[in-house]
Amino acid sequence: MDAFIEFQRVTKNFGAVTVVDRLDLQIAKGEFLSLLGPSGSGKTTILMMLAGFERPTSGSILLADRPITHLPPHRRQMGVVFQNYALFPHMSVAENVAFPLEMQRVPRAEITRRVERALDMVRLSALKDRKPSQLSGGQQQRVALTRALVFEPDVILMDEPLGALDKQLREHMQLEIRDLHRRLGLTIVFVTHDQSEALTMSDRIAVFNAGKVEQIDTPQAVYDHPRTRFVAEFIGETNLVEGKVVEAGAQQAVVRVGEAALNVSGHVSPGRDVSLSLRPERIRLGKEPVAANALIVTVADCIYHGDHMRLVLKSGPLELVARAERLAGDWAVGTETVASFDPQDCTVLAS
Amino acid sequence: MSRPSVRDRSRAFVLVAPLILFLALFFVWPLWTMVTASVVDDAVTKVLPRTAVAMADWDGSDLPPPAVHGALAEDLRAAEDQQALGEAVRRLNSAVSGFRTLLSRTTTAAREADDPAALDFAAVDPRWNEPRFWRAIKEAVPPYTDRNLLAALDLRRDAGGSIVAEEPGAAANRIIMLRTFVIAGSVTLACAAIGLPYAMLAAAAGGVVRALLLLAVLLPLWTSLLVRTAAWFILLQQEGLINRTLTSLGIIDAPLPLIFNRLGVIIAMTHVLLPFMVLPIYSVLIAVPRNLMPAAASLGAGPLRAFWRVLLPLAMPGLMSGCLLVFMVAIGYYITPALVGGANDQMISSVIAFYALGTANWGMAGALGLILLAVTLLLYLVYGRLSRSPQLPGA
């Protein structure tokens, strides 16, 4: 990959606490990368180092092969969208958007033209003389975004920009930002702790835990093939199954879980204790086995979720959660059924 | 919600009654007394009510008609309150000297005369033939006067009643008032120059540093004004700490004159009034969202431009109220200029104190106080008008 932004063994300590630990990260031009992780995982610190508000304790950061580790924030040409928007309360919407252009000493007439065009793009022209306090949360968010975009920066950094919005507006804004990213070919680094947000918007997701990258991959790969237990648990819901590898081939392996033997795909060394991740929606229920793995299970609980049912299934000591469509009918507690799933849906996690 | 009953309301009133009583007793009443003292001039009217009525028809030129003579004789004959009479005499004597003997002689004559209405004034004392004595009475009989207010501004009425400036030799109030504003303005500027960075530092710092910075500002407020001023003596005098340090460092050869001059007054007053500048600015700055300055930087604003375009406009309401507070308190300063200032650094309060305590001229003291109050109110109105338009942060 041709790296546009590059972190080279970047470490950040706050006193005795290591917030970011020897991070290597490459971001391509035009990419939408999400930094996903629980609070305290170091994702915001990484963004702040990229923006220039924090200095790395060691390591270096490169932008287009130029080291920017010690460049002050106002010379970095990065548009930052902050968590609480950080709009200037004493300026109108138009003045807020004009601010970065004024800082670049763009001629007056051109500023007016570009501000109008930018506000048109996010459909805020009618509100250009309002003060930020007179706008709704979603409108403020759009102004903040416009302000970060208007000076055509190399990179847009977003620090949980949708955190303060309600669910419906958040989903709407997710699509809007994704659309802007595609239309303008922007490079976006997006910090969030909301996994569904990261899955919806990103080209790639970097999952962080305790200052380290757990996995960087496409949303689909992160979801379907989590590398670690943390990733499997943090993103979506999953069944974690502990077992021992009893048979190993080049492409396939057999893992013994209690009484049952499960076929899993991939290469693992025999004799190892492993954890498997199995997504609930990958389990198919029916009277007959329909896949390479099939277990006879008893319905222990059935929880109503509107569009689907969540079933708790038991097979000996093993407990699995499955997702059943409403169309499949009701499941009475105590019903016996067969749970089938494919070997490639059983992901072996790194211990 | 139902309307509060009479009982509830009367209970509420009883609860605030001490406050109302306190305000009335210690704020409204003294203020009213001072205001009235500056314009009321009824010492003569009280003693000479008939004369006042009779003089209304006289135009003040030449000698008054006989009716006035009669009225004055009646009044003097009827005057029984020796103290009131004394005050009236003193008031008239301060306008034209000679009234003391003139009136006592005339009073005796009026008491002894069979028909006071027919008393021959010129026979009692030839001075009654001079119109200026009559005019002094005419000028003194209206119960209200603008004499004190005009005098406070170095103005007076001439013989014709039109307002003219006081002769340069007798005019000092305007100079002192101007000096008061210059000193208060300098102190305000000095406080703003020190207070704004200081408040920014305190708002940006955290934990112990912030607590220490605020304590350093608040500590002087908890110390007696006299103690603080005395402390500046030790620091600023000829052989004081500052001069000795500078001399021993070889920066100066002779001690700098730091005390008993304008510089000393401004230094000491700035120190005393700094909390009034720092605290309003600080309270505005801590309400400014933390991420605004980083946002400005990310949008391409260097530290100086970010300060000028973002932080300063947001700190402006605090800065304005700080300036107003410092200026308003400063124009009333009395002790500090008296202790560390020279003769040419005395402010208007010392003149007020001179009239009130030195000469018991409550009229002049009240008039000067009234002008001080008017200036303060005017400033407050200007401030109210200015501070209404901009949006406060977080509003």
Image: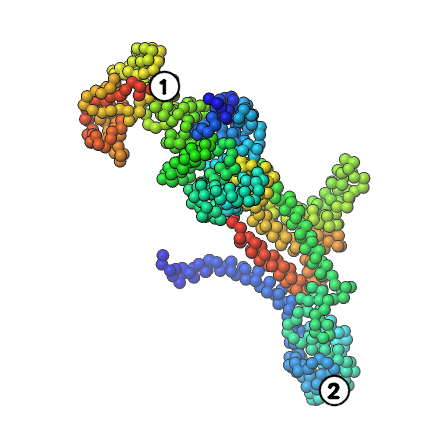
Q: Height in image: A331 above or below B161?
A: above
What is the x, y in percent for residue A265?
Answer: 32, 16
Q: Height in image: A340 above or below A52?
A: above
Please say whether residue B237 is visible from this viewpoint: yes
Identify the residue under disc 2: B120
Distance Cα–Cα, label 2 vs label 1: 129 Å
What colour scheme was applied to this rendering of the protein? rainbow
Identify the residue under disc 1: A349
Taking the spot 59% from the left edge, 50% from the top edge, the residue there is B320
Q: Quadrant of the N terminus of chain B?
A: bottom left
Label 1 Cα crowd, 10 Å radius (few <14 / some 14-19 / many 20+):
some
What is the x, y in percent for residue A210?
Answer: 45, 25
Q: Is residue B269 left or right of residue A239?
A: right
Taking the spot 72% from the left edge, 59% from the top edge, the residue there is B175
The answer to which quarter of the image holds residue B6 is: bottom left
Query: Viewer-nearest of labels 2 and 1?
Result: 1
What amino acid is found at the position of numbered circle 2 in the picture?
Asp
